[in-house]
Every structure is written in C-alpha cells, then in structure tokens.
Amino acid sequence: MNEILFGSMLFIGHLITVSLALAILSSLFVRNNKMGYIFIFFLLISSVYTLGVVFNFSVVLGFSILFMYLCLGVLTYFNIKRKRESQT
C-alpha cells in the first residue's frame, strides 16, 4: 500500500513538473529557436535520468511516465506549431 501511494505521488508530482517545463518550452521556443533547443537538450537529459531512476523503482511507473512524456510532448509540438502559424 505504501508503494502505491509513493508511486502515485511521484507520478502526480512529475506530471505537474513536466507540464510546467513544457509550457516554458512552448513560450521559449516560439520567441527564440536557439534557446528553445538548449532548453530541450537539458529537458531530455533530465528526462532520461528520471526514467532510469523510475524504472529501477517500478517498471509500471516507468512506462506510465514514459507514456506521459510522449503524450505531453505531442501536445506541446502541436501547440508550438499552432503558435508559429498564428504569428505569420
């Protein structure tokens, strides 16, 4: 029971953190491509490290966080694409 509570708290906390980071990426990438790519680089490094740690804790939690990364990444891509089209 304790592991389920810890895993759910870890997932929710990570969901909030990644959502905020991708919102920052979205606004940063639209304003300045170079800074956006630098931010993506550091975000990817931290994501790979986090996935390594989480997969050592629980495989199910690791795959759920990986799925969360994919979904939020796709949403961020389309958000950036929409913002770029509205600027032109």
Image (cartoon, rainbow, N blue to C red):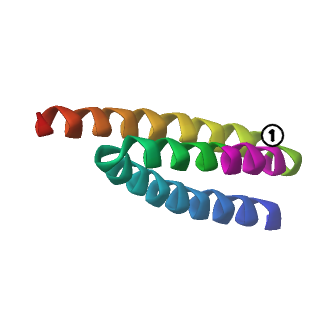
Q: Residue at x 60, y 49 (%)?
A: 43
Front-most of 68 and 79? 79
Front-most of residues 25 and 9: 25
On whether residue 23 falls in the magenta region, the answer is no
Height in image: 71 above or below 54?
A: above
| 75 sits left or right of 65 in the view | left
Circle 1 packing at 10 Å, graded few (<14), some (14-19), many (20+), is: few
Residue at (30% x, 45% y) in the render: 30
Q: Amino acid at mark 1?
A: Val
- Confirm whether the magenta stretch covers residue 51: yes
Callout 1 secondary element = helix
Write the start and end of the magenta stretch as one range.
Answer: 45-54
Identify the residue under disc 1. Answer: 59
Q: Quadrant of the N terminus?
A: bottom right
In the displayed structure, 55 sits above or below 3; it is above
Magenta part, dominant SS: helix
User: Which residue is painted at 72% across and 46% down in the image?
Assistant: 61
Say which quadrant the C terminus sits in: top left
Q: In this rendering, is residue 4 above or below 55?
A: below
Give the quarter of the image for residue 52.
top right
Left/right of residue 12 with respect to residue 6 in the rendered view: left
Q: Is 79 situated left or right of 19 in this image?
A: left
